[in-house]
Amino acid sequence: MASGSGSSKNDFRRKWDKDEYENLAQKRLVEEREYERRDGKTAPPVKRDLLHHRDYKVDLESKLGKTIIITKTTPQAEMGGYYCNVCDCVVKDSINFLDHINGKKHQRNLGMSMRVERSSLDQVKKRFEVNKKKLEEKQKEYDFEERVKELREEEEKAKVYKKEKQKERKRRAEEDVDFEEDEEMAAVMGFSGFGSSKKSH
């Protein structure tokens, strides 16, 4: 198999007998084919479904802002990050999790190929009709009277806010006037310089 004796004494590389290994590989292939013929079964190719829409909403925000204590015995599904129960793996951030669930490995584990069903002209027309009906329903739901009512409420809130601001200004102005009167009274009584060591002449 491997001959250690080389033609020169300085050549330390192993020499492999390529013909011998070629014969071994051929024997193994022949044995595998005979084994399949004896069973009478060849492994059928896996038929996968075409790619289709998700019928659930991907939950990316349920653990947002929460603190979790992780120990050695914490199951993988409860560790930090996003857990994929189909592939049994944890992904650390939301972008990589979305890439994972849209990726080839995850779709294969779900039993789908990455091929998409080709839509016919009739299917496309029906889809446009459904979307058009949805838009029309939304426009019907939009009521003019409700919008006017909302605008009136917003105006009332703005008026209340302005009144509060004006009251706040008046109160501040009154406090300033009271403070000035106190200073005049202190000057008359001889207390003109509270807190300062400088004398005004």
Image (cartoon, rainbow, N blue to C red):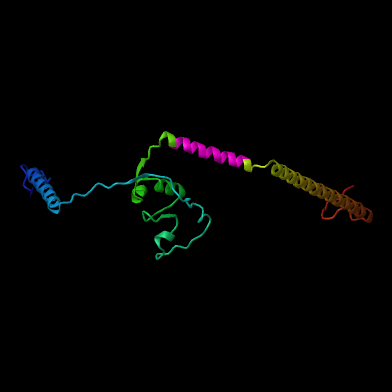
- Check residue 133 for magenta coloring: yes
Which residue is at the front of the view, 176 or 71? 71
Decide if residue 87 is on the left or right side of residue 154: left
Figure check: 70 above or below 43? below
What is the x, y in percent for residue 26? 10, 45
Determine whether, in the image, residue 49 is placed left or right of residue 79. left
Q: Magenta part of the protein: which range?
A: 123-139
Look at 40% across and 66% down and name the residue there.
73
State the image coordinates of residue 65 (x, y, percent, origin top left). Answer: 53, 55
Question: Front-most of 172 and 92?
Answer: 92
The residue positioned 44% from the left and 60% from the top of the image is: 78
**Residue located farthest toward the bottom when viewing the structure as drawn:** 73
- How far across and down, in percent of the image, does residue 27 sit? 9, 48
In which image quadrant can residue 50 be found? top left
Which one is in front, 165 or 192? 165
- Taking depth in this image into account, of 52 and 154 the one nearest to the observer is 52
Residue 102 in the figure: left or right of residue 171: left
Rendered location of residue 43, percent (x, y): 21, 49
Who's the residue at 40% across and 35% down the image?
120
Q: Is residue 41 left or right of residue 57?
A: left
In this view, which residue lies farthest toward the top? 121
How many marks on residues? 0
Q: Residue furthest right?
A: 188
Residue 128 is a magenta residue: yes
Main SS class of the magenta portion in the image: helix
